[in-house]
Image (spheres, helix red, strand yellow):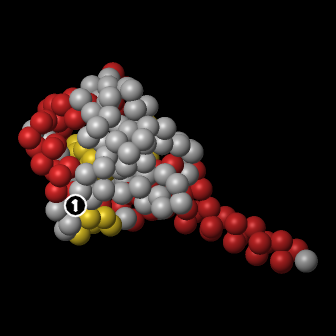
Amino acid sequence: MKQLSIIFALIIFFAGVSVAQKSLYSFKTKTIEGKDFDLSSLKGKKVLVVNTASKCGLTPQYKELEELYRKYKDRNFVIIGFPANNFLSQEPGTNDEIKEFCETNYGVTFPMMSKISVKGNDQDPIYKWLTEKSENGKFDAEVSWNFQKFMIDENGHLVDYASPRESPMSEKIISWIEK
């Protein structure tokens, strides 16, 4: 009986270790142009993951996101935008339409990925990892609206998040990038 208890404890321990070892680098996605993108290519960089939308009251954050990216991109920092249509159909466009909108209206040069779902039954695995403690080992963080920002450290681990209304240029985000 004692051996069975030890085996059970080891199984639980190793199950917990494997969850904690999952990182952003465990995922692959597609760029907005439809090309494969392995997130492990971002090793050594701080990554700000943002779910975006073109017809939202927060859409002007694209301007600040681009400013942030240009300011820090040479300091091992990158922003990854994931268009999503989960909130009041505020991202109805195709990938081509979204790309054109972002470039034309906000001069976006940071990497944009293909449109995904960030919540619900069809939630993309990356967002399942970002939002569920059982996946990321850190905390639960429901995506409450467009432009929620997730902060990933240089080792691919989730460290924090900022609410949709929080400016990309907020003290919280700037100090995280600069530390």
**Picture quarter with the N terminus:** bottom right
Percent from the top left, x then y, of residue 56? 32, 34
x 43%, y 52%: residue: 118
Q: Nearer the viewer, residue 145 or 132?
A: 145
Percent from the top left, x then y, of residue 149? 37, 38
**Picture quarter with the C terminus:** top left
Whether residue 97 is visible to the viewer of this picture, yes or no, is yes
Q: How crowded is mark 1: few (under 14 residues within 10 Å), some or many (20 or more)?
A: some
Give the residue furthest to the right: 1
Does 92 sit above or below residue 160? below
x 27%, y 47%: residue: 81
Q: Nearer the viewer, residue 130 or 17?
A: 130
Left or right: residue 140 versus residue 38 is: right
Percent from the top left, x then y, of residue 146? 38, 39
Q: How many labels sit on residues?
A: 1
Q: Nearer the viewer, residue 1 or 98?
A: 98
Left or right: residue 4 versus residue 75 is: right
In the picture of the structure, the residue carrying the numbered disc 1 is 31
Whether residue 46 is visible to the viewer of this picture, yes or no, is no
Task: Give, as a three-letter code, the residue at label 1.
Answer: Thr
Percent from the top left, x then y, of residue 67? 16, 31
- Quadrant of residue 135 within the rendered picture: bottom right
x 57%, y 50%: residue: 133
**Helix, strand or loop status at disc 1:** loop
Does 16 sit above or below residue 2? above
